Image (cartoon, rainbow, N blue to C red):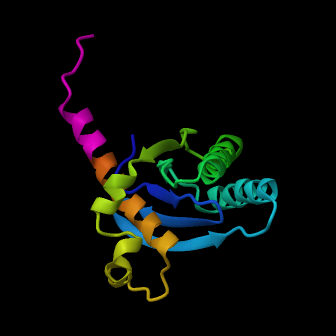
Amino acid sequence: MTEDGNVIMAIDAGTRHLGICVGYGGQYVTSWAGDFDGPDVSDRIAAVAEYMAQKLRRYDPDVIAIEEPMGDHGNRYVDRVLGRVCGAIEAALALTPRPEVEGSQGEERQLLWVNPTHVKGTGFSKDALQAVRNMVGKDDIGPDEADAIGVWLVAVGELQAQRFRNLTAPKEAE
């Protein structure tokens, strides 16, 4: 289970853009949007997997929070591509081992799927760009990056709730 000080990478997956936010527990660190343009969907998906592997190696997150695809775009093709993008992110996660660090326990990364309605409920989404910009002190935030910040905020809350449940759960007798 993660503690307050672990690295959380939050992802708003899209068919052409990934919003990504990195936080150290409840402290915002950085965010950006990665662009994956091009006519060939398979090339874009392969690029997403490679890009995510690079970011996993660079930031070595303890938790990867991904906004669940809604499947309500009104376009089944877009929904299928979005599912493949999420699969590429999961593949990168599975194929990118954590670095060996002296004294480390070799802990696995936690994958956390975040409900999109919870992200919208944070108020930090593409629907409230100015509020997001004010919160992180950055003027050039676009909609995908703003959604990733919302995913991170929801992940922080969900991880705290998991931690609280673990602390208050009845102990099993040995």
Image: 149 above or below 134: above
Residue 133: image location, x then y, percent = 38, 83
Residue 115: image location, x then y, percent = 38, 48
Residue 128: image location, x then y, percent = 34, 76
Image point 30% across, 40% down: which residue? 162
Q: Residue furthest bottom?
A: 139
Image: 76 above or below 33: above
* Residue 151, image quadrant: bottom left
Q: Taking the image as drawn, is residue 4 in sight?
A: no
Q: Is residue 173 magenta?
A: yes
Image point 36% across, 73% down: which residue? 127
Residue 137 vs residue 76, the one in the foreground? 76
Q: How many marks?
A: 0
Q: Residue furthest front?
A: 74
Image point 38% across, 57% down: which residue? 5
Q: Is residue 126 magenta?
A: no
**Left or right placement of residue 88 versus residue 106 in this view:** right
Q: Where the C terminus falls, by quadrant?
A: top left
Part of the protein shown in magenta: 161-174
Q: Taking the image as drawn, is residue 120 in sight?
A: yes
Residue 5 vs residue 125, the one in the foreground? 125
**Left or right placement of residue 106 versus residue 170 in this view:** right
Q: Where the N terminus falls, by quadrant?
A: top left
Residue 136: image location, x then y, percent = 38, 79
Image: 66 above or below 137: above
Image point 36% across, 67% down: which residue? 27
